[in-house]
């Protein structure tokens, strides 16, 4: 794996443009009689994070530690007891009820019918776009943000309109609301805390964007993959009267990225539409049961989040002491830009020291930037020492 591979995987659409799916070629134009792929897909780069064998992996915002040992033991017992010859519960009823119950303190109105669960929040986002995007429809993002929002929109044939964040990556809510009113996109994405900047949007952003989309019948999707690390959330606003979806994941806080489980909290009428387009039995029995079990360990999860938030502040301080620009983070990762060396070179030198961070250096508006996931105290120390060695020897 080299730098070119790292960069080749990134999607890099130009900001502030509407991309339409180009017209199809005739099937007969296929080379060597191979079937021709959709012409818009042919132009796409896949989305991949490099998986490099290093000692310190801080590139994909996973939890740094395994789930509690007792959960592992219960999972092992569960594997033995599953009805492997039967299809899983198509409705994932127990899991959805348990997810909803977990939000009782934040939003007492949520029930199993307000929850849509899928294989990672990426599948939730894709299902949302299959149902509410598609040919002739538009999705709006505010860049720089999570590349999968645009990528999945394009895959589902949805045109993408890319708005911009300010130079400091904060969201200009007045401008965002004006853009929504002007273009009336079918789906509007916010991401808070935002990946890859780590920043949380202003408190009035969700209520004001909700008003704006409600005016013309649009849908607001707030991606809260990192919501548990942040001081505020849009979860409390989810109900049947608002066109609002909040997406969350087990991949970060719940130490279960390997499981592939994410979910949406949404109005019941919207969950019904998602159920129509998702594949039958898409969520396997093991994932459902494992997710349900994990929810028994909420206290352990909350303790881990508190620990990671503490480490995030220590890491931010450590970065601030080095010649790098650092952005404030409400997530479990931090965006930074080396001031005296090219980001891509620093990335490679970190890899040479067996430390892997995310190379954002070639992403639009993130020239020279790198993103580091908050790891264990030991991993964070390894990262800071390696970085200091490179940028401030
Ligand atoms: C903002 C954001 N949303 C969604 C996801 C997808 O998470 P998963 O599919 O693992 O639930 C990620 C993963 O990094 C993310 O950063």
Image (cartoon, rainbow, N blue to C red):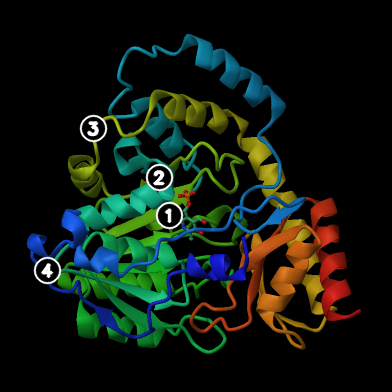
**Which tag, 4 or 2, sits closer to the chain's start?**
4
**Which tag, 3 or 1, sits closer to the chain's start?**
1
Q: Nearer the viewer, mark 4 or mark 2?
A: 4
The CA distance from mark 1 to mark 4 is 47 Å
Q: Which residue is mark 4?
A: 25
Q: Which residue is mark 1?
A: 236
Circles 3 and 1 in contact, beta carbons < 8 Å: no
Residue 81 visible to an observer of this rendering: yes
Kind of element beneath mark 4: loop
The image's mark for residue 280 is 3
Q: Is mark 2 within 8 Å of ligand 1?
A: no
The CA distance from mark 4 to mark 2 is 37 Å
Q: Which residue is mark 2?
A: 263
**Which tag, 2 or 3, sits closer to the chain's start?**
2
Residue at the image point whose x is 51% and y is 36% from the top = 259
Q: Is mark 3 within 8 Å of ligand 1?
A: no
Above or below, 389 against 279 in this view is below
Q: Of residues 45 and 105, which is closer to you in this image?
A: 45
Kind of element beneath mark 3: loop
Q: x and y percent of residue 191 in the render?
A: 45, 66
Residue at the image point whose x is 66% and y is 34% from the top = 67
Q: x and y percent of residue 148 in the render?
A: 40, 62
The CA distance from mark 3 to mark 4 is 32 Å
């Amino acid at each position: 794996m080299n730098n070119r591979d790292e960069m080749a995987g990134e999607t890099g659409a130009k900001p502030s443009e509407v991309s339409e799916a180009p017209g199809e070629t005739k099937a007969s134009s296929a080379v060597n009689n191979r079937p021709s792929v959709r012409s818009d897909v042919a132009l796409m780069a896949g989305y991949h994070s490099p998986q490099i064998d290093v000692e310190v992996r801080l590139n994909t915002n996973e939890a740094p530690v395994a789930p509690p040992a007792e959960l592992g033991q219960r999972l092992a017992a569960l594997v033995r007891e599953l009805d492997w010859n039967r299809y899983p519960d198509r409705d994932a009823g127990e899991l959805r009820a348990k997810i909803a119950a977990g939000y009782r303190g934040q939003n007492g109105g949520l029930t199993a019918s307000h929850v849509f669960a899928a294989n990672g929040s990426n599948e939730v986002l894709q299902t949302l776009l299959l149902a509410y995007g598609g040919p002739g429809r538009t999705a709006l993002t505010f860049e720089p943000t999570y590349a999968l929002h645009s990528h999945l929109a394009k895959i589902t044939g949805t045109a993408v309109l890319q708005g911009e964040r300010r130079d400091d990556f904060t969201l200009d809510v007045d401008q965002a609301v004006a853009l929504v009113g002007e273009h009336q996109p079918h789906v509007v994405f916010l991401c808070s805390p935002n990946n890859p900047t780590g920043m949380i949007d202003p408190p009035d952003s969700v209520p004001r964007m909700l008003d704006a989309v409600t005016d013309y019948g649009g849908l607001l999707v707030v991606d809260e993959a990192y919501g548990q690390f942040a001081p505020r959330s849009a979860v409390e606003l989810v109900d049947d009267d608002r066109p609002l979806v909040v997406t969350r994941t087990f991949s970060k806080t719940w130490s279960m990225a390997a499981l592939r489980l994410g979910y949406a909290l949404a109005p019941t009428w919207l969950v019904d539409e998602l159920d129509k387009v998702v594949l039958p039995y898409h969520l396997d029995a093991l994932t459902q049961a494992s997710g349900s079990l994990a929810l028994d360990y909420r206290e352990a999860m909350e303790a881990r989040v508190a620990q990671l938030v503490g480490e995030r502040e220590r890491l931010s301080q450590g970065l601030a002491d080095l010649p790098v620009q650092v952005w404030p983070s409400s997530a479990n990762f931090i965006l930074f830009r080396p001031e005296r060396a090219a980001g891509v070179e620093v990335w490679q030198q970190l890899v040479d020291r067996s430390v892997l961070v995310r190379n954002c250096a070639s992403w639009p508006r993130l020239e020279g930037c790198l993103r580091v996931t908050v790891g264990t105290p030991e991993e964070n120390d390894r990262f800071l020492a390696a970085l200091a060695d490179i940028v401030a020897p």
